[in-house]
Image (cartoon, helix red, strand yellow):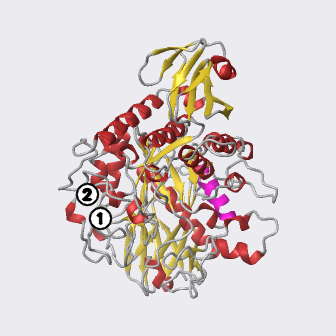
């Protein structure tokens, strides 16, 4: 391979020939990044045998390495971009086996986007599945050339036609609901043969799935959301891709994915990572096996794959001005790589928040991965936040069952008592349900009271609350645990729907009341600094009552949870360690004054939220 790097002053666009058959990932980059190295993965027939000449405006950008891969159809070019480099366009001139010329943009960063500003306990995250939320543009329902083209709303695992335009049209609804962060299931291309609606089998890391829209529309959506005080959390999948990913027919390196020939599945034994008695083969199979047959496991121990995934994440953060990330199947990825990945992102965006999915009900398993956690095996956790599945499980069981010594609200108390295992429990994301589990309304036997109790605790306990689309209107998956049904269509997102969650038309009185209550709850929370930052204290449940407080700079929010089927009288003395000297309180929603100098009554199966005046 011959490398020629030249300095040149002016680029004549009239002489540039753009070759569609050559692909460069990432498609552009920026000057002024903390990490000065940039690695380009170039793909095209026999490009690995070509001669490359790089036209550079000045010596602030240098080509320091160029190499071919195992496949002759790849070329890997490493650049170093000095801190003082200005925005410019590099000219990549290929000759020999490939006669093409490409422009490569190095852009100036847009500080107005606020890339990597993070999210925290002052936020409320709203999770939605784009294919099932709203169909704003029926012209992209069927896209020529895509494997799965049929839109069939009656098929639980088929495509239903939701898209980015549909989300854009609901931004005002989300703002009024009290949402401040929007997490969408992945919207990158999933050109799989079937069941690709969920987004977790990516086939192109740099392309918005055309059945959702395009990059310009995604940028518009991010900008319009930001204008309404809503930031974006990007769903990232470092562990696997889709089996029809463009590179699967021509892998750059033989070890680009794990088990490329046998498609060996993971054993899903997440405990093997921390288990002091586990054998090496169990650990290796867990982290290197394919998640399912349609999802190849990416080999992050290959340094070029590692760099590809890191740069791809940075590219989306910088392009869209993302506030943070949600990381799918976090423990399935290589441990050392996840440390490298998080370190690289935080070097670029010190305020970035990223929440990892570790679906374990054991707090010690979840805590292992969080940043600041020093583990007995010497591994240092690196994820700023984690999803709190243990608390999710305990809340849902608590509100759905009767009170006894080890059931009911005691479950919540016992789970929170384990917070000492976390490096920072306040940064855990807490939730009543998500896209992979039955909806909260179904899990609590379609009890409106129990659903209210669960949601009220989610927004007042420590942590960052997240709710799933449709929770506010009591969406359910009655009689089935099918993920396709759990991710049902949001009412009113399609022409001809008989109900419309945005306008309230066609909703039952029960749904309308719950939606109104949720809106009040979330908007009340936005103003409560004591809930965002306050010190948390709780009293062990007694006779069906769980009491806790959040206190910050003299302001206190007191939460009384009654899990009984009858009213619970609460003497002031019973919770005096939480109330302090305050006897006059304000009820959260009504703003009515509450005299708690002696006692008050909490209605059956309810949560009473009070705050100091």
State left or right for residue 308 relative to residue 227.
right
Most common SS among magenta residues: helix
* Residue 481 appears in the picture as rendered: yes
Q: Which residue is mark 2?
A: 135
Q: Residue at x 43, y 34 (%)?
A: 522
Label 1 secondary element: loop
The residue that label 1 is drawn on is 160
From the viewer's side, name the closer residue of 41 and 18: 41
- In the image, which disc is placed on residue 219? none
Q: Is residue 329 magenta?
A: no
User: Is there a contact, CB below 8 Å, between mark 2 and mark 1?
Assistant: yes
| Depth order, front residue of 38/221 | 221
Q: Is residue 297 left or right of residue 111?
A: right
Residue 110, percent from left and from top: 42, 45
Return the x and y of residue 107 as percentages of the image width and height.
42, 54
62 versus 126 height, above or below: below
Residue nearer the viewer, 46 or 150: 150
Residue 339 is left or right of residue 152, and the answer is right
Span of residues in magenta: 335-347
| Residue that appears at 29% across and 61% down | 213
Q: Position of residue 116 (x, y in %)?
A: 51, 46
């Amino acid at each position: 391979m011959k490398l020629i790097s030249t300095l040149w002053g002016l680029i004549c666009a009239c002489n540039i020939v753009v070759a569609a058959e050559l692909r460069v990932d990432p498609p552009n980059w920026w000057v002024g990044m903390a990490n000065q190295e940039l690695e380009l993965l170039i793909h095209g027939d026999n490009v690995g045998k070509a001669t490359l000449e790089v036209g550079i405006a000045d010596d602030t950008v240098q080509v320091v390495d160029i190499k071919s891969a195992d496949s002759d159809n790849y070329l890997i070019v490493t650049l170093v971009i000095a801190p003082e480099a200005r925005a410019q366009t590099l000219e990549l001139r290929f000759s020999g086996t490939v006669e093409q010329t490409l422009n490569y943009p190095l852009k100036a960063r847009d500080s107005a986007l606020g890339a990597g500003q993070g999210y925290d306990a002052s936020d409320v995250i709203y999770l939605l599945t784009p294919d099932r939320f709203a169909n704003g543009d029926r012209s992209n329902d069927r896209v020529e050339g895509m494997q799965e083209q049929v839109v069939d709303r009656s098929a639980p695992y088929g495509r239903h036609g939701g898209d980015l335009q549909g989300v854009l049209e609901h931004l005002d609804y989300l703002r009024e609901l009290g949402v401040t962060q929007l997490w969408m299931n992945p919207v990158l291309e999933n050109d799989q043969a079937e069941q690709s609606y969920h987004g977790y089998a990516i086939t192109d890391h740099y392309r918005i799935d055309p059945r959702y829209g395009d990059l310009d529309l995604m940028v518009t959506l991010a900008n319009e959301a930001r204008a309404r005080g809503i930031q974006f959390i990007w769903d990232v999948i470092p562990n696997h891709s889709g089996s029809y990913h463009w590179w699967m027919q021509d892998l750059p390196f033989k070890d680009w994915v794990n088990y490329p020939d046998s498609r060996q599945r993971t054993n899903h034994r997440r405990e093997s990572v921390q288990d002091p008695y586990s054998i090496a083969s169990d650990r290796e199979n867990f982290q290197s096996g394919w998640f399912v047959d349609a999802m190849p496991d990416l080999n992050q121990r290959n340094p070029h794959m590692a760099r590809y995934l890191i740069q791809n994440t940075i590219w989306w953060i910088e392009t869209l001005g993302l506030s943070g990330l949600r990381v799918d199947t976090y423990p399935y990825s290589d441990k050392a790589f996840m440390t490298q990945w998080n370190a690289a992102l935080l070097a670029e965006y010190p305020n970035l928040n990223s929440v990892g999915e570790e679906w374990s009900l054991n707090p010690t398993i979840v805590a292992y991965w969080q940043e600041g956690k020093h583990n007995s095996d010497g591994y240092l956790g690196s994820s700023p936040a984690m999803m709190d599945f243990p608390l999710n499980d305990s809340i849902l069981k608590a509100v759905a069952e009767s009170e006894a010594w080890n059931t009911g609200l005691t479950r919540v108390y016992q789970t929170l008592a384990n917070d000492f295992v976390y490096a920072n429990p306040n940064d855990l994301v807490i939730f009543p349900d998500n896209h992979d589990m039955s909806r909260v309304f179904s899990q609590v036997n379609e009890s409106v009271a129990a659903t209210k109790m669960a949601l009220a605790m989610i927004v007042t306990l420590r942590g960052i609350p997240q709710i799933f689309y449709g929770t506010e209107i009591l969406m359910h998956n009655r009689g089935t645990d099918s993920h396709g049904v759990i991710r049902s269509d949001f009412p009113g997102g399609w022409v001809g729907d008989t109900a419309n969650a945005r306008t309230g038309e066609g909703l039952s009185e029960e749904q309308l009341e719950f939606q109104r209550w949720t809106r009040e709850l979330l908007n009340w929370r936005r103003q409560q600094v004591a809930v965002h930052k306050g010190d948390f204290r709780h009293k062990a449940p007694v006779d069906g009552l769980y009491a806790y407080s959040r206190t910050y700079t003299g302001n206190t929010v007191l939460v009384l949870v009654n899990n009984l089927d009858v009213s619970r009288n609460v003497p002031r003395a019973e919770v005096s360690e939480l109330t302090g000297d305050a006897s006059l309180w304000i009820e959260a929603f009504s703003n009515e004054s509450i005299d708690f100098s002696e006692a008050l009554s909490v209605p059956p199966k309810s949560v009473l939220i009070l705050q100091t005046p």
